[in-house]
Image (cartoon, rainbow, N blue to C red):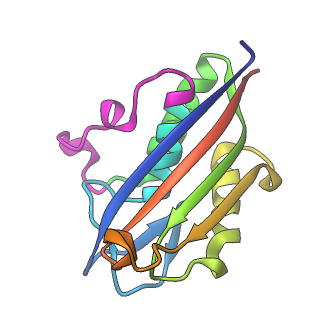
Amino acid sequence: MPFRVGSGHDTHRLVEGRPLILGGVIIPHTKGLAGHSDADAVLHAVTDALLGAAALGDIGDAYPDTDPKWKNADSRLFLTEALAKLNQLGWRPVNLDVTVFAEQPKLGHVKAAIRDSLAHLLNVPPDCVNVKAKTGEKVGHIGRGEAIGCHAVVLIEKS
């Protein structure tokens, strides 16, 4: 089969005293995401999607939060290592679609920067990456501004 699809999802709580990083981009905000690593929910979802597409498990298998090695790790490392594993197996990403769920901050002004960061990390043209931002419409933990979530879908092909 020359193509495969992978899906990834991640959610992290918003807390005081942490930077907000989404897709490898630092976003000015009063809160950041809580997690063992830098808690970049976008990169975690994309990494999960890549691993899933290649049937390589998930981000928790590859980078467990019980391992002190990953404490405060830059999530770009997770994505680049997952991509290297795919490349070793002869796979490469074709396109990526990402939806970020956040009540605050509004992300319209940083979607292009996130897209460009993801395209660079995946080594694909920017027009092969789409980033959408949705609010929680005041419903649930995202709508109350307690968390940010992300869903990612990736298509990979045999190179």
Question: Residue 113 falls in which quadrant of the image?
Answer: bottom right
For residue 111: magenta? Answer: no
For residue 63: magenta? Answer: yes
**Residue at 24% over, 52% down:** 71
Q: Is residue 158 left or right of residue 147?
A: right
Q: Is residue 19 left or right of residue 157?
A: left
Q: Is residue 131 above or below residue 122?
A: below
**Residue at 41% over, 25% down:** 57
Q: Residue furthest top?
A: 1
State the image coordinates of residue 88 (x, y, percent, origin top left): 60, 19
Looking at the rendered image, the quarter that the C terminus falls into is top right
State the image coordinates of residue 139 (x, y, percent, origin top left): 38, 74
State the image coordinates of residue 40 (x, y, percent, origin top left): 42, 59
Residue range corresponding to the magenta coloring: 52-72
Tally of numbered discs: 0
Q: Is residue 62 above or below residue 124?
A: above
Q: Nearer the viewer, residue 89 or 154?
A: 154
**Residue at 49% over, 73% down:** 26
Q: Is residue 73 above or below residue 115?
A: above
Q: Is residue 79 left or right of residue 32?
A: right
Q: Is residue 143 above or below residue 34?
A: below
**Residue at 38% over, 71% down:** 142
Looking at the rendered image, the quarter that the N terminus falls into is top right
Question: Residue 94 falls in which quadrant of the image?
Answer: top right
